[in-house]
Structures are given as C-alpha cells and as structure tokens.
Image: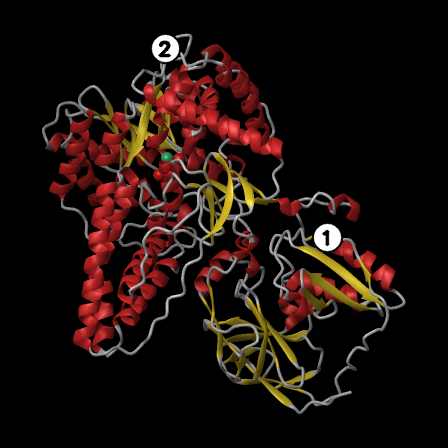
Amino acid sequence: MTTIQPLELLAPLAGVLLPLDLVPDPVFSSRLMGDGICIDPTSQTLCAPLTGMISNIQDSGHAVSVTDDNGVQVLMHIGLDTVNLAGKGFTRLVKDGQRVVAGQPLIEFDADFVALNARSLLTLMLVVSGESFDLLAPGTGLVATGQPLLRVTAEPRMAVEEVEEGEALFSRPVTLPNANGLHARPAAVFAQAAKGFNASICLHKQTQSANAKSLVAIMALQTVQGDTLQVSAVGDDAAPAIKALAALLVEGCGEAIAVQAETLEAVAPVSSASVLRGVCASPGSAFGQVVQVAEPELIVIELGGGEVLERAALERALQHAAEALISLQASVGGVQKEIFRAHQELLEDPTLLEHARELLAQGKSAAFAWNQATLATVKLFQGLGSTLLAERAADLADVGQRVLKLILGINDSAWDLPEQAILIAEQLTPSQTASLDTRKVLGFVTVGGGATSHVAILARAMRLPAICGVPGQVLHLANGKQVLLDADKGELHLDPDLAEIEHSEACRQQHALRRQREAEHAQQAAVTRDGHHVEVTANVASLQEVEQALSLGGEGVGLLRSEFLYLERNRAPSPEEQSRTYCAIARALGVERNLVVRTLDVGGDKPLAYVPMASETNPFLGLRGIRLCLERPELLREQFRAILASAGLARLHIMLPMVSLLSELRQAREILEEEALALGLTELPKLGIMIEVPSAALMADVFAPHVDFFSIGTNDLTQYTLAMDRDHPRLASQADSFHPAVLRLIASTVKAAHAHGKWVGVCGALASETLAVPMLIGLGVDELSVSVPLIPSIKATVRELDLADCQIIARQVLCLEEAAQVREALRLYHMATVETLPVVEH
Ligand code: PEP
Ligand code: MG
C-alpha cells in the first residue's frame, strides 16, 4: 500500500469548464475511462497539469498521459473522435518517457481545423489511475491555462494488483480490426472488461506487453489496424478471461468495424492484415519490393553567425534551389513542369522572404529563419480549411525543405533505389514524385495525401500506380518484403500468392501493350463500331495542356478551368493579360475545334488569392462559381470581355459553373450580351451551363431552351447528390459517381437537352474512367471531356463499342441499387467486350 501527497492539477488549457456529465460521449460521461473534467478550449496549446513522466503520447497527437512519481496518472484527450484525424492538426512537443514539469506545453493543435474536421473540440482531463479529487474552481465557467483546477485527495490508492503466480494461458492471435487501433475509446472498453476478472491479464503486441487492466498501458502499445495481438492470463478465471477478451478484440471493443468476424476461428487464419486498404490515387498494379522512404532528420540551430553571413547563405540556397527548379522544368513537361514553375514562384514570394529576413536581422541562422518563415505560411494555408490551399501548403513545405537542405548542405539528389521498388512513405512531395526514376519505381503507397493532391495528379501523368490514405501500419513493413500493389482496388497485398502475382503481371503487360496501341491510334476519331461519333475533348488549365491534348488526339477543349490560370497569383491579371491567354489557347486550337471556357469557378475549395472572400461555414454550399461572379458582376464582365477577344480564333463556347437557378443564367447572359455589343460582335459565342447541382439536373428541361449546351460536372454533381464532401478522406470510397442516383440525373439531363436539340458533354472525372464510357455513351452523352493523358485510352474504348449495346447496359445500370453494383455490371460488360476485341483500324 502507498500513500500520496495532496497534488494539484493545473488546467491544461484555457477555456470553458464543463462537468463530465455534459460530454456527448458515453465513454467519457459514464467515467469508463476515469473521472475528471472537460474544457471547451479557447487556447491551442495543451500543457502538463502536473509534473511527471509522459507515460504515453499517441502517435496521432490527440491524447497524452502524464504519470507522477506516486503513480497518479492523468490522461488528456483533445476533442472527440479526433483519432480519425490521423495526426492532422496536432503537433507533439514531447516524447514517450520524457519528464515534464507542470505547465510545460505538450501538444499544439489547430483548433479551427479540429473543430471543422472532428466531432467536437471538447477536451478531457481524466485521473485514470482512480484517485478521487476535489474541484478547486467553480464547476463551470472560464479557466485560464495553469490555473489550479483539481486537488487529488491524499487518500490511500488502491492496492497494487497482486501479480498471480503460475503458468499463463494464451489466446490465439487476433488481428486487430479497429481502423485506428486501440485508441482511448476501445482501450477503455477493453481495460474495463479485463478488470472484471481476478486473473492477472496482459495484452501482447509482438515483443511488447501491457497490463490489460490499464487504459494508458494499452494505449502505450500504439496499436494499429492489422496488428496481431494476444491476450494472456494467469489465475483462477484465466480461461474465461482470455476467451472473453479475445472475442472482444475480434468484435472491435465496442467500435464499428468493417468486417464483422463472428468467431476467433473465423478471424485467425485469414489475417485481415494481409491487405491494407487506401484510396486509388493513380490506377494500375505492380508487384515489387517494399522500399521505405523516410526523410532524414534536419537539425536546425537557431542562432546565426552574423546577419551578413547568414543572409548570404540564404540567398545562395535560394539561388541554387531556383536553378534546380529551372532545370527540372526543362526536363519534364505538362503538369510536372507547371508544378515546378509554381514552386519557383513560391521561392520569390515577397511575404515569405520578408519574414525570413526579419528573423535574420534578429540574429537567427539562415536555416532557422527560412524554416520559421515557411512553417508559418504553411500553417496559415493549412488552417484555412481549404483543400486546395492545404495542397498549396504541401507545395510550399516541399520548396521549404528543398531550400533548407541546401542551407544545411544535405545532398537531396534522387534516392538510391533498388529495382522493382514500391515506395512507402508517410507522404511524398510533388518534387520527390516528379523526380522518381520510373525504371526502378513501380508504384507508391502513402499514409497521407488524397486523390486530388498534386502528388496524385503527377502519379497519373507518370502512369505510376499509387494509393494514398493507407493505415500507418504500412510504415512498419520491412524493406525488401514482396508486395502486390493493386491501385485500381486501392489495395496493398502483403502476402500475395503466386496466382495473384501472375494475374497482376499479366494485367500489367496487357495494359502496357494496350496503352502503346492506343497512343499509336490516338489521332483516329472516336467512332463506335456501328458508326456513332463521340467527341473526345480535354480538360485543361493552361496553354501547355492544350498543346499536349492536341498531340494526344484531343478533338478540342471541353473544359478550360479558367480559375486555374491564375491560381498562384495574388494580384488579378490585367484585362490584356487575360485576353492574351484566351487568344493564345484559342489560336492553338484553331477555328475547327471547340474551346469551352468556364468562367471563374471560385469559392468552395478554390479560393482565389486576388478575389478576397469572407469565410463561410459551408463554402461548398456558399458563394461559389456563378453565385460569386454575380455578386461581383465587374469580375464577370471583365472576364467575358477577355474571353470575347478570342472569338473567331476557335469555336468559342462560354460555360457557367455552379448554376442552380434559371435567374443566374439569365443575368449572366444579359451581361454577356452587353459586353458583346460593346465590342461590336455580331454573333454571340455559344453559352452553356455546367450541370453539377441537382436542381439544375432536375430542371434541365427548363434550362435547355435557354442554353446552347450542357456539360455535366460529375465531381460536384456527386457530392451534392449524395451529400458527401468530394475531398473527404473517409467518404472517398462512397462518394462515387457511379451511384445510380447520379446516373439517373445524367440520363434525365441528356433526355431534356436532346428534346431541345442541345448537346451534352460530361467533363467531371467520370468521363475519364474507361469503365464508365459505354454507360455514358448509352445514356446519350455527346462529348467526353477528359484528363489529358487519358485521351488516347478513352478514344480507343469508344472505338471498341457498339452504340446499341451501350444503350442496353445504360438501361440496366439505371435500375441497380448502388455504385458497387454498377461498377460490377460494367466490369463484366467490359471484360466481355472491350478486352476481347482487337483495336479496330479506321
Ligand atoms: C465537376 O464538378 O465535375 C467539374 C468538372 O468541375 P470541378 O471539378 O472543377 O469542380
Ligand atoms: Mg465542379
């Protein structure tokens, strides 16, 4: 038996104090994890409430426990369900086993990001070792960081559990099904269940063991999905204990799990850890060896050796980085080139340089000043809650590292990789991706990233199979382990059998052959075997992409995302500059080809630096696209004028994004007519709208008489129809454009348009999926506007189809219940037709 001295716990945060009973989560409010308090934070740094040792800080940075010398253990948990953020928004300032003093900062967090992306910001401080306490502040109201909050009473603690003697019984190995491992919630459920037995019980993960009755000890195992765990017990009730606890692990310890395994026997032999799942960032498959690519730790010393010296070091590094980026631009084309150009521009950003120089003037080192300046801007970008700016943040972080390594004299030349490498990384930067040697690298797998990131765009352009959003467990795979990457399914197979490998290799070779044939025939028209022509055009964001599209057989531009032309700029381009850009693009296309210019689609996930906007609670449902332009008609007027300058150089079409009301179309048309009149144009360019909001799709018959064409934006149409954020990492697999609800809207839009003699294109990502092509043609879509590298593939697919068959399959899929069924029906159809037919010569 031990006694403890009275101990005061300080408030770990500033904020509003709430009783635990008000926490909207039974695991906390029922005190299953322990008694304590809750704070709704107003500060963003979590500090130690007591002096002691870090007994556990979760890898994801959302929870930390401190144990003092008397064994009092205090757990702090930031937010509810924050484990799902997988570390995003949290910065750990301490390590496991580190001694800390009361008041010391432990974790910094981005309150806005957490509040926007997790269930709640409510932060818990719980005395998990079970001592009672008195509250030193009123039960509710404001508290300041460091304010004494609880007095742990000097009562004898519970007797330390007697460790039972004897031979331990072990459960069969269990594969942990919980997506986020045994984090606080399932760990508490498990510990509570273990406490129901007299036996001494341990939970084992490889060579590590934890007292199964201690929440913190379980959390300290830092388990991840797919870990193999065993329960052991010694004592009278050891047998029922391991049976019950192993079953609890199999069932997910109270959490919903993807695959419900009924019994231990059902789970043990077929380890779910043999496949790790993520989201497809770039299609294809590859069999190769694991190569873990971890970044070297960069040691940055704060104090410099004098301003002149340090300033020179920074200028030198900036100069070398710029040279490296220029030579990279010369060695690549298309998207890669643009990314490096954007990186080069970031190096010249005046605000960034000013910040770094201010720090140099304060005596800091070049490395410190540059690092601080880039980190501050990265944080700013990440904190704005915009996917697009978060991606820009990744670019800035990438450039920041490039310069920092140059200052520190670290050689960052391409990795020395073995053959047949499947790279595994927490995250790859765009420049790392673009510099990959594709003779050696067969594909890559990342824990972070999303399907819309620059890295994913690059991987697709380089035709490297890749998956992202894979559980962190992947970072523990041994180098050299043979794995099978099936990016189409978003899977990494850890123990592929020979048949799977052979099948994947055969598919890869078949795909490579097919791509080669497609490229050879890229200039042929996309006409079905029974003579139906489908226009295959390109989605572009620059003149360079237009040129690339033409060389790959693009028949025109179906979507010029005009907002991307000036995304990196913080000043509006002059009207002359805008006109020059549109004219150059139109000239490259020529009078025979369509140019569909979409007016600025700003807002939502695409803020434009030179169009300041108030922040919105739901930007995707806010002032986006045409709504914003009509709020600022001068912006639309100026853009119309610039676009109209290119009239006559190509078959000019103007398209309005995010239209949901007929009045929006009417207002925009009026402005366009006024501008055309002012320019003395006798003929108006074609005017169309994007169909990407359900109201526009449902009212297509009403819109049709007032437009020249429709183009269906399936990316947004899917997010708005299914009410699923298109960039939400956890909804990525469900926000699927193959959902019959989306397909029905496409079908009715086409029907309404054709009834009025108007054509319909699809410019969302669905058009770039070969699997979707027969269905879209069967639904009557006239034009497919696709991602540039996929033009030859989509055209070849069209040439292998029969319109009559496409119409049958289209009718079938409209009657199915869910996206997976549609995909399966189309896969079977694809296997039965496209892959068995030779390429048809026209
Ligand atoms: C779409 O929403 O499908 C579309 C093409 O527009 P964007 O992806 O640019 O929003
Ligand atoms: Mg859209």
Task: Answer above or below: position of 204 versus 715.
Answer: below
> Residue 737 appears at what percent x and percent y?
49, 33
Mark-to-mark CA distance, 1 and 2: 56 Å
In the picture, the quarter occupied by the C terminus is: top left
Q: In this view, does 737 lie to the left or right of 76?
A: left
Q: Residue 642, located in which quarter of the rendered image?
A: top left
Residue name at image x 66 percent, y 45 percent: 272
Query: In the drawing, what numbered circle is on residue 841?
Result: 2
The type of residue carrying mark 1 is Val
Q: How crowded is mark 1: few (under 14 residues within 10 Å), some or many (20 or more)?
A: many
> Residue 320 appears at what percent x and percent y?
21, 58
Residue name at image x 56 percent, y 30 percent: 502
Task: Answer above or below: position of 477 versus 163.
Answer: above
Q: Which residue is farthest bottom?
A: 5
Q: In this view, does 491 lie to the left or right of 801?
A: right
In the picture, the quarter occupied by the N terminus is: bottom right
Label 1 sits on residue:
174
Q: Is residue 44 left or right of residue 154?
A: left
Q: Which residue is farthest top?
A: 530
Residue name at image x 66 percent, y 62 percent: 185
> Residue 267 appears at what percent x and percent y?
74, 46
Q: Residue 691, located in which quarter of the rendered image?
A: top left
Q: Does the residue labelled 1 lie within 8 Å of ligand 1?
A: no
